[in-house]
Amino acid sequence: MSYTETMLEYVYDQYCLCYNMEDALDFIEDKIDFTREEIKDMIQHTIDYNKEQFIKDYKSLVEEFKSKFYFTEIDCKKEKIKWHLFFSHHC
């Protein structure tokens, strides 16, 4: 892991302890040699990256789910869904 990645991880971990930007900035500012704005940018970058990664992973799971299942019957009166599982033989 590079120095930059290590710093991003450390800063974000400190933020995750309280999920309060100002408290995290107060604590971190005394510990490392970066300005408050730089630290805030590092935290925001990691938040944005994690959010993008989550969305990407979620969409991938949805697509994987769609490729393996399909609905054979939806009975709204009985409030049940019947479905059929089939396996695709691709990776």
Image: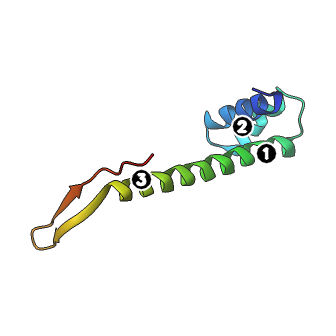
Quarter occupied by residue 76: bottom left
Looking at the image, the residue that sits furthest to the left is: 78
Would you name the residue on which mark 3 appears? 64
72 on left or right of 37: left
Q: Nearer the viewer, mark 2 or mark 1?
A: 1
Query: Picture coordinates of residue 88 (x, y %)?
Result: 35, 51
Quadrant (top left, top right, bottom left, bottom right) of the N terminus = top right
In the displayed orientation, state which residue is furthest to the bottom: 77
- Labels 1 and 3: the sequence-earlier one: 1
Gap between marks 2 and 3 measured at Cα: 38 Å
In the displayed image of the protein, which residue is found farthest to the front? 89
Circles 1 and 3: CB atoms closer than 8 Å: no
How far is mark 2 from mark 1, CA to CA?
9 Å
Residue 24: which numbered mark, if any?
2
Q: Residues within 10 Å of mark 2 (few under 14, many from 20)?
A: many
In terms of secondary structure, where does tag 1 sit? helix
Is label 3 in a helix, a strand or a loop? helix
Mark in the foreground, 1 or 3: 3
Residue nearest the viewer, comparing 47 with 72: 72
